[in-house]
Amino acid sequence: MNELEIKKIVESIVKEKAMDQHGQVPTRTCSDITLDMAKELILAVEQRAAQMGVKAVIAVANRGANPVAVHCMDDSYIASFDVALQKAYTCAALKMPTTALKELCQPGGELYGIQQTNQGRIVIFGGGIPILTEDGECIGGLGVSGGSEAQDTGLAQFGEAVVRNILSK
């Protein structure tokens, strides 16, 4: 057998296994953010940050809260790298925006002290959002750091709108 024959056999088996009970290839659903999606999201958030005059670090984590991509704008704060990465981790791990978590972590709140867990990786101030599908499934997290809390939160919320656009393609 030559390489072309092997390739055809493998493609045939894969196609057959991919078909549902009606002989149709099911439409692909997004269960995790891809690198291409993360890069598109980062580019859009970077452009918005530049318009605002913010030198941001933008991090995207997958649904397992592991980094997919981290992007540092020129002259961004060194400390923003870790903050953005942990905001993305927090949102993917807890499936909620960091602004919502902030409210729950105040003294007397239901999650008071959670920022001391997960080796200190939980961030409890604005700038992070979970990346959700139209069905509400969490497929990752976005973390932005480099501006004020309000600027980081605004950029993350802008990123949320970008994600909806990316997922609708």
Image (spheres, rainbow, N blue to C red):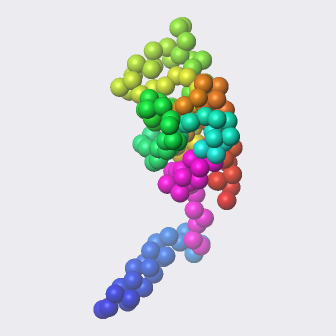
Front in this rendered view, residue 165 or 80: 80
Horizontal side of residue 99 vs 17, given as left or right:
right
Query: What residue is rendered at 65% in x and 25% in y?
Result: 150
Residue bounds of the magenta highlight: 24-45
As for residue 39 lying within the magenta part, the answer is yes
Residue 10 is covered by the magenta coloring:
no
The image quadrant where one finds the C terminus is: bottom right
Question: Is 29 placed left or right of 123 in the picture?
Answer: right
x, y (%) of residue 114?
45, 19
Q: Identify whether 134 is placed above or below 89.
A: below
Residue 132: x and y, percent? 60, 43
Quadrant assignment for the N terminus: bottom left
Instruction: Give the farthest residue toward the bottom.
Output: 1
Which residue sits at x=56%, y=36%?
Answer: 55
Q: Can residue 88 be seen in this view?
A: no
Residue 43, given in percent of the width and then of the height, sits at: 59, 50
